[in-house]
Amino acid sequence: MGCLEGKVAFVSGGCCDLAATNARILASEGAKVVIADACEEEGKKIAKSLGSQGRFLYLDIIEPSEWIDAVEITERAFGRINILVNHARRVNYALFDDYNNQQFGECIEVNLFGTFYGMKTVIPSMQIARGGSIINVSSVSGLKVFPRQPGYVASSWGVRGLTKSAALDLAQYNIRVNSIHAEDVVPTETNADSIETTPASMNRFNSPDEIARLVLFLASDKSTHITGAEIPVDDKEIAGWINQG
């Protein structure tokens, strides 16, 4: 039996490579997994690959009413939600003096409000289940600053603070809340220099599978006393800061 046997996991933004990998590893350990995203074709394909353990739901994460409907459907299909993995990530690029209101609003709405709505909506389900684990997948942009992405940086720091605040308030219900801060997993022209922030001995980006193993740990009972944590994944400067602390 897997370490998540009998658990129900809700994975938002489930069509990206990282979210899909997380869904698969959670299912491989016995969880029933709902993949929720606005990308129907890819989401249905991922859910189908999980067999009877998977289900796809259409979800616009910036619509609170759709979150409510999605949680109700999940409960009817599989039972109370034990695990929420938020993958709300929107990034856009421009120098600050060229960055416009729409760009900033998009990042805040998707990354911060989308995460908030998901957390708020699953709380009643987790309370009835007598506990749960909320995992907010963010970026190292929430721990340090990168140029040309003010909205992404601001929203990533916001997710970090939101996670810590919720962890304090939800501890009384045995609901744990943690955030993961990873490097971008797909090199692009814009983020190619980010590889310089990973440990020199690795000299590469982390993979979805490596992050998924951390998600599995936080979702399982092996991490029952970890909450309010911000966990960097292979970032040289942050690792050095932790070691000095």
Image (cartoon, rainbow, N blue to C red):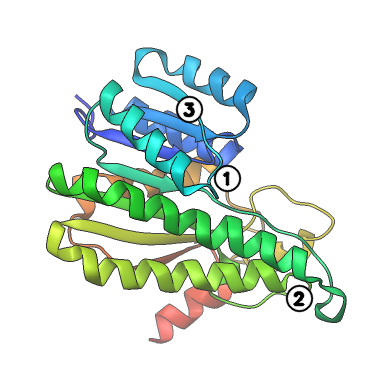
Horizontal side of residue 189 vs 20, given as left or right:
right
The relative height of residue 170 versus residue 87 in the rendered view (above or below) is below
Marks 1 and 2 in Cβ contact (< 8 Å): no
Kind of residue indicated by mark 3: Leu
The relative height of residue 191 versus residue 40 in the rendered view (above or below) is below
- Give the quadrant of the N terminus: top left
Query: Is residue 201 something one can see in this rendering?
Result: no
The relative height of residue 226 versus residue 71 in the rendered view (above or below) is below
What percent of the width, then of the height, locates residue 137? 48, 54
Kind of residue indicated by mark 2: Pro
* Residue topped by disc 2: 147
* Residue topped by disc 3: 57
Of labels 3 and 2, the one closer to you: 3
Q: Earlier in the sequence, mark 3 or mark 2?
A: 3
Of labels 1 and 2, the one closer to you: 2
Residue lying at the far front in this picture: please name it.
Answer: 65
- Give the quadrant of the C terminus: bottom left
Q: Residues within 10 Å of mark 1 (few under 14, many from 20)?
A: some
Query: Is residue 171 something one can see in this rendering?
Result: yes
Marks 3 and 2 in Cβ contact (< 8 Å): no
Horizontal side of residue 129 vs 78, given as left or right:
left
* Residue topped by disc 1: 207
Kind of residue indicated by mark 1: Ser
What percent of the width, then of the height, locates residue 130? 12, 47
Q: Secondary structure at mark 3?
A: strand
